[in-house]
Amino acid sequence: MTRPALTSEPRPQPAGGPVRVPRQDPVVAPAAAVPAVRRADVDAELWPDVARLPAAGPVHTAVARQLVGRALDRLGLTGPSARDGVPAPGPRLTLHDADAFHRRIGRHGLIGFGESYMAGEWDSDDLAGVLTVLASHADELVPAPLRRLRGLWVSARPVADRNTRDGARGNIQRHYDLSNDLFATFLDPTLTYSSAVFTGFPARFDSLTAAQHRKIDRLLDLAGVGEGTRLLEIGTGWGELALRAAARGARVTTLTLSAEQAALARERIAAAGLADRVDVQLRDYRDAEGRYDAVISVEMIEAVGAEYWPAYFTALRRALAPGGRIALQAITMGHRQMLHTAATHTFISKYVFPGGLIPSREAIAAYSAAAGLRTVADDGFGEHYAETLRLWRERFTARRGAVTGLGFDPVFQRMWEFYLAYSEAGFRSRYLDVRQLLLTEGTPR
């Protein structure tokens, strides 16, 4: 297979052909070693900002060295690591190129921190553990007086990432159209790419497939989906929710902007003999047609962008038939953190989810109420997402050979592992949460 074609940011082209998904949860082999990367060997065309060091001034670098060094020492993240053969009480961060590490952070903050990992300038014996410690102390890493100077090391989000109709299509393609086969390396056989709901912990006592079905069934129950229900799904994924809704007797219209997802979802639906009950449409949520008894949208609002949240909730309200119910699953963060993130170009917005923004519960409440919707139920289960991400990360690292065979180089693999561990840390530290909400027509009480 040819190498992925990328421009200024990683955009591997989709692998050919639909993936064949096994019926049972596969046995996960032990994780392969993190691929070693040297900056000198990084493909500058694929990864320009990883291959070269930023032009950070000596003052920025010195400040970063002081602040970061003190923070790592205070949090117990420095010193010998387990991979050095020395017992360590907690996760450790090992610097291979301290000057480059501090230079990147001094110039680009958290983006530089992630790019330094992609460049192989630091490693950890427990990546998710290190990131969880950092996330748990996020508000303490920079002294209060210096927080007012955030503009010196952060940049605004690119205008090109706005979620206009054309922009949203491009943003979705840059992530979800990477390759169906790539996602199949770490998702369970349902190809469900959102938080599962487990019966308890540790999650190993509950298969990921069963936990994903439990999550889907909870949403279908919340929305009152049954025989004859007219259901609109905003955000198809690879079709598992539509399949389970149709098996209940619902008539499903499901919308996506990902051509790769739509093709595989249609194939899976046809194979299940439910093509007459499910209509998969390549359509923007703003162009949804018809009225429905139930509307479900799972972790879609994060891809909408704050600028378009009014349009999103208006579309939900417009699609709802009298007496209908809306079930949402949404990742959330604190409102103050959301406001900071909304104004900042982050590692995730640059490399993983361009144009995306995680809302706060306050933002969801305000924008849904403005659209004439009332929140009837709101249930959080962030610890379940941490476990889901742990399982995804373990599956991904166990199948590095398959990922390499799909044409994704070591820098991509380090980036993807960082993204999964970074997300897991967000939920483990409770910086992030995930919630299922029930909305109905009406003003808040």
Image (cartoon, rainbow, N blue to C red):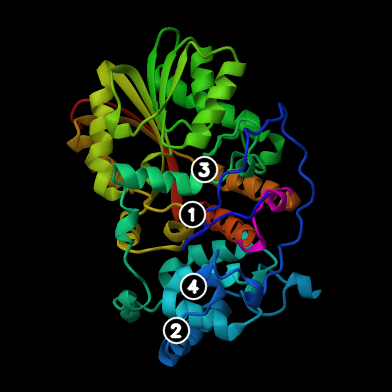
Q: Please, what secondary structure does the residue beneath circle 2 have? A: loop
Viewer-side residue, 170 vs 21: 170
| Residue at x-position 66% and y-position 32% | 189
Mark with earlier residue (2, 4): 2
Mark with earlier residue (3, 2): 2
Q: Is residue 92 visible?
A: no
For label 2, the residue is: 55
Q: Main SS of the magenta segment?
A: helix
Mark seen at residue 352: 1
Kind of residue sitting beneath label 1: Val
> What is the C-alpha distance between the residues marked 2 and 4?
12 Å
| Residue at x-position 61% and y-position 74% | 77
192 horizontally vs 340: left or right: right
Mark with earlier residue (3, 4): 4
Q: Are marks 2 and 1 in contact (CB under 8 Å)?
A: no
Query: Of circles 2 and 1, which is in front?
Result: 2
For label 3, the residue is: 177
Determine if the magenta segment contains residue 4: no
* Percent coordinates x, y for residue 144 in the rendering: 34, 77
